[in-house]
């Protein structure tokens, strides 16, 4: 049996949406993008949603929108994909990495230690689909002594008057916090629609705005749409309608808009997400947990607690008392059985580039600890029941063999 790790969900409704776009002869940004933005507002409860061509470009745009630049600092978790820090570096600022909690999300106590008078934003990452502890982070950034450290250096910073909280929600579309969409817990929430995500547009992302009332989010939406189109006052669709060709460039923007041909894929998926695709992910995650709970080596991931519920983007299987090398051996054995698995994530300080600019893995011990025993299992709606059973059977077999072997060695020595 061959089981891929995370294939995109492509059914007839997706094909129909894409064909509708192709038949319309309009494939760049237009009505499908607008429809996808409206669906995202509906799903997340956000004030506005802006679709872009990737999570990374959306994060760069929002940091630039806030005026983050040379000499500034942005706090990020060490345990994340590289884009979380690279977007900060692309703005000329410094990513200040901090360690994580055992649930894989950023540690609010470490955030507090890292805040300085250079801190402009926090990028909190919802690893595997589990929201961060946003109540603690929001309380922290609104504390009088933390506000007093904040030095505004742009118009947006002066309006907000505090550190900006951005949720890196690349994994967490559909996640809940206190029974409400978790996107409502940050000033700005940025989702990824990359090919392996719960909802995909092949490549893409979406910025959801939940800024305080001091901001006019409708006006910010219009500004960000221009920002994503080189600072141009009209998009191609508007220009194509009637005698409407004249436009202006009013500031130095980026070119990061999402095309309709991509939005069509996500639009069809999103309309099935809440009632079909997401519940199926949840069912598979529960089946994994129920099967592994019988074994002492299983570290149960936080899928739901009193405040939060995951989007079930990943099933991060962690195994007690194994080394990084033993974890790698397990991955090889599982893949030999035809099951494609992954690791989320290699902490950024372990990567060559980040080591070259001064980050040290020894500064983030819990990030390494969690990474070294983690294996991400396949979890997606297309998985057949016999495939899920096959994964469970083989994973248990491979891990149990390793555990028995280690026990035998301990007894004989």
Image (tube, rainbow, N blue to C red):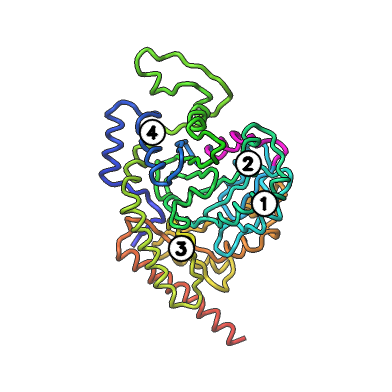
Query: Which of the two discs, 1 and 2, sits closer to the camera?
Result: 1
Residue 42, relative to residue 381: is it above or below? above
Nearer to me, 200 or 149: 149
Residue 71: in magenta span = yes
How packed mark 4 is, by other alpha carbons closer than 10 Å (few <14, some 14-19, many 20 or more), is some
Query: Which of the two discs, 1 and 3, sits closer to the camera?
Result: 1
How far is mark 2 from mark 3, CA to CA?
29 Å
> Mark 3 — residue?
303
- The tag on residue 143 is 1
Q: Earlier in the sequence, mark 2 or mark 3?
A: 2
Q: Which residues are magenta?
A: 58-72
How packed mark 1 is, by other alpha carbons closer than 10 Å (few <14, some 14-19, many 20 or more), is few
Secondary structure of the residue carrying tag 2 is: helix
Residue 188, relative to residue 290: is it above or below? above
How far is mark 4 from mark 3, CA to CA?
32 Å
How far is mark 4 from mark 2, CA to CA?
28 Å
């Amino acid at each position: 049996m061959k089981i891929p790790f995370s294939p995109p969900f492509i059914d007839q409704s997706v094909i129909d949406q894409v064909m509708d776009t192709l038949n319309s002869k309009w494939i760049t940004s237009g009505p499908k993008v607008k429809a996808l933005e409206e669906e995202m507002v509906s799903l997340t409860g956000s004030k506005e949603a802006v679709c872009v061509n990737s999570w990374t470009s959306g994060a760069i745009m929002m940091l630039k929108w806030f005026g983050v630049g040379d000499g500034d600092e942005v706090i990020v978790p060490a345990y994340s994909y590289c884009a979380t820090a690279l977007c900060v570096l692309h703005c000329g600022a410094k990513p200040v990495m901090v360690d994580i909690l055992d649930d894989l999300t950023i540690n609010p106590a470490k955030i507090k230690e890292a805040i300085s008078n250079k801190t402009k934003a926090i990028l909190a990452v919802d690893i595997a689909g589990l929201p961060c502890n946003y109540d603690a982070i929001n309380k922290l950034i609104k504390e009088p002594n933390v506000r007093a450290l904040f030095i505004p250096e742009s118009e947006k910073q002066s309006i907000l008057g505090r550190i900006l909280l951005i949720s890196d929600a690349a994994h967490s579309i559909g996640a809940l916090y206190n029974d409400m969409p978790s996107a409502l817990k940050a000033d700005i929430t940025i989702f990824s629609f990359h090919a392996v995500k719960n909802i995909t547009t092949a490549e893409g992302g979406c910025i959801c705005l939940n800024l305080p009332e001091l901001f006019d989010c409708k006006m910010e939406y219009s500004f960000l749409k221009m920002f994503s189109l080189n600072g141009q006052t009209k998009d191609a669709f508007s220009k194509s309608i009637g005698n409407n060709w004249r436009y202006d460039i009013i500031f130095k923007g980026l070119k990061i808009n999402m095309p309709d041909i991509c939005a069509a894929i996500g639009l069809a998926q999103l309309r099935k997400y809440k009632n079909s695709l997401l519940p199926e992910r949840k069912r598979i995650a529960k089946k994994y947990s129920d099967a592994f709970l019988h074994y002492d080596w299983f570290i149960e991931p936080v899928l739901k607690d009193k405040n939060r519920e995951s989007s079930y983007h990943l099933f991060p299987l962690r195994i007690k008392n194994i080394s990084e090398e033993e974890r790698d051996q397990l991955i090889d054995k599982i893949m030999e059985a035809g099951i494609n698995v992954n690791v989320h994530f290699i902490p950024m300080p372990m990567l060559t580039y980040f080591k070259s600019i001064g980050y040290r893995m020894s500064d983030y011990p819990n990030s390494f600890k969690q990474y070294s025993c983690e294996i991400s299992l396949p979890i997606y709606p297309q998985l057949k029941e016999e495939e899920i059973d096959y994964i469970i059977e083989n994973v248990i077999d491979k891990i149990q063999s390793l555990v028995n072997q280690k026990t035998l060695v301990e007894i004989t020595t």
